[in-house]
Amino acid sequence: MIEGQRRRRASAGIADATRVYCGAAVRRAVDAHPTSAWRGATCRVALLVTLWLVGLRPAHAEPPPTLVLVAPPTALVDAVTTSLGPWQIRVVVVTAPTPADQAATTFRATYVATVRGTTLELFHVGEPGVQTRDVPTRIDDIEAASIALTIKTWMRLGPPPTPADQPPPDGPPTTGGPTETTPPPPPPRPAPPRYAAIATVGLGVRANQGGFGTRERLIITAGVAAPEVDATFGCDLGSDLDIDATTVWSEALIGAHLGHRFLLAPMWTLRPRLGIGALRSRVDGVNTASGRTITEINYTLFLDAAVDAIWRRGAWTVTGTAGLSSVPFDLELRGQLRVTAPARLEPWLAISAGLHLP
């Protein structure tokens, strides 16, 4: 407001001076040289009028450049906004996957940064191609700060503007009296823990159990999640399967798995994993000679391979799994019940829900 009053007073002074000087210049030129004076006087008047119009033109500050973040995690948005604050960069967040050139055109942006899986794509309007940087699958506060520094360095912003370069705030000038102070900013949030607890419960179906048939399963897992690797321990329990009219087969699997997560989208993760464990086989049958019920139990080794598609929102997860278990040895029960279960492959499917804490 003060700056506008100053401009108006200066413009009025220039206009008065222009009228006085132009009138005097024209009169002197006409009296001295009637023929050529008009040309010189006209040039002086045109020059002064031009200066006057320049003084009247309002000064518009050049708008700050715009950076568009495409599909970024929340931690990265906070880190980039904080990092670019001194430069007054306008930051626009687009959650849906969008081509960089389209985002730049839509928001009139100079810079576009896209998070695509484990790759950061950097697009600068006016420069050929797209630059790429590797980023981790899970971006916590520490990784977000590092990526924000990478983006700021790529933008080549130079030193931040000094307070003198910034426009003055509206309102009357401050006096020597007491002024209201801004409270200090809150302390930064603590970095999230590097490890988290995971637990799931689900239902599934396992085929070729013991080489005899297919039955439904109950699957329970618990473990620890690192930034990119999960270690889990679980059990696979199922119902009985009839071998014949007098014999029933059942099996339970207990094993450990190690998996690696790959980020597919902001809430979707793919996790291939391998496991090893013990398979407990149980056969209940009737001895035809004595008529008594006989139970035989045996243990053997199994190997497991599976792929999980994980959807996570906050602490809640939903997982769909396709797996294949290998029992590399034949199982022969030669007691009062004679049953043979050959070495085999047991494909299985499951869907489960659980928690990821914190």
Image (cartoon, grey):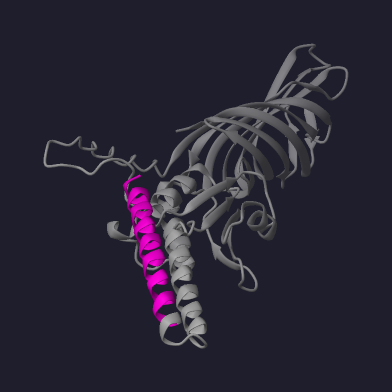
Magenta stretch prevailing secondary structure: helix
Q: Residue at x 45, y 78 (%)?
A: 44
Q: Residue at x 62, y 52 (%)?
A: 107
Q: Is residue 276 left or right of residue 7?
A: right
Q: Is residue 259 visible?
A: no
Quadrant in the rendering for residue 14: bottom left
Q: Is residue 348 left or right of residue 304?
A: right
Locate residue 171, reporting x and y percent: 30, 40
Locate residue 277, reporting x and y percent: 60, 41
Between 115 and 181, the one lying in front of the other is 181
The magenta stretch spans which residues? 1-29
Q: Residue at x 64, y 74 (%)?
A: 128
Quadrant in the rendering for residue 326: top right
Above/below status of 331 relative to 228? above
Above/below status of 93 relative to 238? below
Q: Quadrant of the C terminus?
A: top left
